[in-house]
Amino acid sequence: MLQPGDKAPAFQGFNQHNQPISLSDYAGKRVILYFYPKDNTPGCTAEACSLNDNLAHFTDKGFIVIGVSPDSVDSHQRFATKFNLGFNLIADTDKAITQAYGAWGEKKNYGKTYMGLLRTTFVIDAQGMIEAVVTKVDTKGHAEQLWKILGV
């Protein structure tokens, strides 16, 4: 898992509009890059809506919000439309971005161990360095959680 002070891995993927998105598109800007397991599930929806409901606050402070999950472009398009999400969702179907950020790993649920996406948020500074990492995400209050961490 990446830590604060590490260089953020470059990435490229496609958003919910099937447009290419890369980290270099946001050079000189602060990026909130959050990894979530699946569109239209209760926790993932709560997290996306928390960020979306507070998107103006983040953009006013100079942040770009980007979500990443293994879902398809079509799934992201439906999810973004259903909840009127105002930020990009990247389809990471091959999990290359998720793995580059160390957000893929062993999970335990109901006594079973399996590999899956580890819900994680990375804040990337304007120079492309990891500024903060959130591994214990409060899905319903994720925006407020980030405000406390970032002091904004």
Image (tube, rainbow, N blue to C red):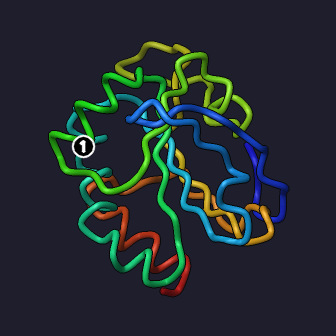
Position in image of residue 7 (x %, y %): 84, 55
Residue highlighted by disc 1: 45
- Secondary structure under tag 1 reads helix
Q: Nearer the viewer, residue 126 or 147?
A: 126
Instruction: Locate residue 82 relative to residue 145 in the image: left or right.
Output: left
Q: Quadrant of residue 126?
A: bottom right
Q: Residue at x 36, y 68 (%)?
A: 143
Give the farthest residue toward the left: 82
Q: Quadrant of residue 13?
A: top right
Position in image of residue 151 (x %, y %): 52, 86
Q: Nearer the viewer, residue 43 or 129?
A: 129
- Quadrant where the N terminus sits is top right
Q: Residue at x 36, y 62 (%)?
A: 142
Question: From the viewer's perspective, is residue 145 above or below residue 114?
Answer: below
Q: Nearer the viewer, residue 62 or 131?
A: 62
Q: Residue at x 30, y 71 (%)?
A: 54
Q: Quadrant of residue 44?
A: top left
The amino acid marked with disc number 1 is Thr
Instruction: Locate residue 91 relative to residue 86 in the image: left or right.
Output: right
